[in-house]
Amino acid sequence: MVAATRHDLHPMPTCAICGVPIDGPPLTDDETTAVLHPACAADRLAGDLAVAGLALAAALLARVAVVWAG
Ligand SMILES: [Zn+2]
């Protein structure tokens, strides 16, 4: 008889972003229920913030352009 290891009972979850098994406490995405590395989730969040920042900057520039044109 071979004793089941903890790994067999609980297969290691795989990160939805980088696809690497998560060795440690996983982070769960509330929207997709996917599990992520905390670091990968932070990277993605930073990317989202960068996109949001660019959109905000574009909106402000457009507004300034309208003011100048008027
Ligand atoms: Zn990852």
Image (cartoon, rainbow, N blue to C red):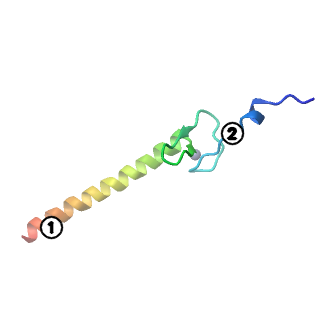
The residue tagged with tag 1: helix, strand or loop? helix
Residue 37 spot, x, y in % from top left: 56, 41
Query: Residue at the bottom extreme?
Result: 69
Q: Residues within 10 Å of mark 1 (few under 14, many from 20)?
A: few
- Residue 57, by quadrant, is bottom left
What quarter of the picture does the C terminus occupy? bottom left
Q: Earlier in the sequence, mark 2 or mark 1?
A: 2
Residue position for label 2: 12
Residue position for label 1: 65
- Which amino acid type is marked by label 1? Ala
Tell me which residue sits at (30%, 59%) in the image. Answer: 55
Asked if residue 38 is positioned above or below residue 70 in the image, the reply reads above
The residue tagged with tag 2: helix, strand or loop? loop
Query: Residue at the right extreme?
Result: 1
- Which amino acid type is marked by label 2? Met
Camera-nearest label, 2 or 1: 2
Tell me which residue sits at (89%, 30%) in the image. Answer: 2
How far apart marks 2 and 1 lie (CA) works out to 53 Å
Lateral position of residue 11 relative to residue 61, left or right:
right
Tell me which residue sits at (93%, 29%) in the image. Answer: 1
Q: Residues within 10 Å of mark 2 (few under 14, many from 20)?
A: some
